[in-house]
Image: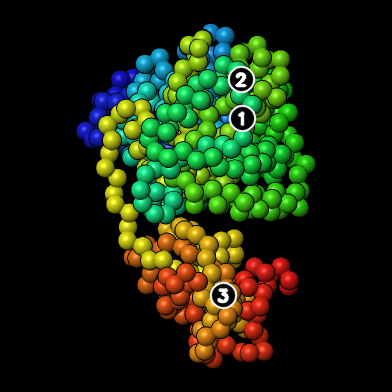
Amino acid sequence: MDAVEAKPGPLHGLTMALKDNIDLAGVPTTAGDPRNDRPAEKNAFVVDRLIEAGAVASGKTNLDQYATGLVGTRSPYGACHSVFSDEHISGGSSSGSAVAVATGEVDFALGTDTAGSGRVPAAFNGLVGIKPSRGLVSTSGVVPACRSLDCVTVMARSVSVARQAFDVMVAFDPDDPYSRRLSSLPRARSGSGAVVIGVPDRPLDLDPLYEKPWQQAVEQAQKLGTVVPVDIGPLLEAADLLYSGPWLAERWLAFGDKLDDVGEVDPTVRAIVRKGAALTASDAFAGFDRLAALARASEPLWTEVDALLLPVTETHPTLTEVAADPIGVNSRLGRFTNMVNLLDLCAVAFPGPARDDGLPFGVQLIAPAGHDEAVIELAAVWCGEPSRALPEPAAVVQLAVAGAHLSGQPLNDQLVRRGATLARGARTAGDYRMFLLEGSLPRPGLTRTLEPTSGRGVEVEIWNLPSAELAGFAATIAPPLALGPLELSDGDQVLGFVCTADGADPGRDITDLGSWRAFLDRA
């Protein structure tokens, strides 16, 4: 490309490469398919932001065709290998972007990450890879792979440079229907004190050369905070859904019409994605239902830890191994990455201790959506890079919910969209009664009796709601419900949903069931 003068700004003079499914004005966006040879009319939204901030686009990079793969070998332009070994893969699908950064050709590079494509190549080339929360970085001007899950990611040789670019990339884009505004949430877990890092409570079936650096990584985590074992079973099961559920149909929708030309389409990409054509609407809803159940099962994990530490992959395959079993090897590489976007999480990958043979070993820190800054900061501390003072957590109000606002219930999104986080489960004091309220949406109402009782109380969830959101949230509550003081079984006083006397119909008393979920199960 012709030389371009850098604009003034926070990224002035930094060079960048773009995965070739991201638009750069005047350059074809091939997505690894030579038939796509028409130059892009304008820059992708995120590219415009980076250029305006002073970065200089050096060119486009190779990828697994249509961003379908974690190996970096599914391209008509040839396979990429790790900069550490000619025999080992670079990882994909953002293979060329990782190589361009690892060789020093550019300061940072953009990739995309649907199943792990911004973290696997980072791990295999000794880089930092930031995978933002879904919708935090616009995908306008990006060729979709699985549009509801796609994220633009950034790779660099340091957390500092990756973070500089990330800061510029984050912006709401009204033209991207998947773009969303997310409050920056410094901690994934309520409370204060030392950082708590979760590690799997089970063997991980790692390559023998990975076992030692993984144990060393866990020991390193213990120097940063408290390490606790956690159940990652629901996460691993969710990872299996990405290529066995309805999201294959979304890939088929994105580029299935391109798969008929045998001469131009990678045969492995065709074999994987064409399965999406046979999926039905009932298959889709079955997949969504299963994912919702797994998301619910994983929720307790995030009340215990600030971040989850995992290897990026189980192994680092050779080019020969991928050629012998292209689908099987690729599937194994996604075991610890596929679930992150499905479960609406953010992640940052970075180098862990090296293997005994000198090849890199990558680890990742994962947290719920909106906690990007927290995991990036933790990665910076881990890597011995300058720390950045994170904003103090916003003042919060503890809010008890008992019905339609419980996690997984129809109105829970009203809390989540306002930045509320689940703190813990609890029960009310024993003298509260629960009544079934009339209306199109079934809901319970809690009313305190005038005389003491020996009841066991009603099950509630305690959510931390930013104080600034309280007034707006209260305005959504319809009578006979209102917000008022509510006493818990341990004597704590919190704000909660209470029911005025006109809604407390003795004929609709459901207190004996003990919880709203028990009522729904019975109904």
Task: Identify the secondary structure beneath mark 2.
Answer: loop
Residue type, mark 2 in image = Asp
Q: Which residue is mark 2?
A: 207
Q: Where on the picture, by quarter, is residue 327? A: top right
Q: Which residue is mark 3?
A: 457
| Foreground residue among 166 and 485 | 485
Q: Which residue is mark 1?
A: 204
Query: In whole angstroms, how far apart are the C-alphas of marks 3 and 2?
Result: 50 Å
Q: How would you rate the neighbour count of disc 1 (Cα within 10 Å): few for under 14, some for 14-19, many for 20 or more?
A: some
Query: In whole angstroms, how far apart are the C-alphas of marks 3 and 1?
Result: 41 Å
Earlier in the chain: of badge 3 and badge 2, it is 2
Residue plotted at (42% across, 40% down): 226
Residue type, mark 1 in image = Leu
Q: Nearer the viewer, mark 3 or mark 2?
A: 3
Q: Are marks 3 and 2 in contact (CB under 8 Å)?
A: no
Image coords of residue 234 (percent x, y): 63, 44
Task: Identify the secondary structure beneath mark 1.
Answer: loop
Quadrant showing the C terminus: bottom right
Horizontally, residue 95 falls left or right of residue 435, namely left
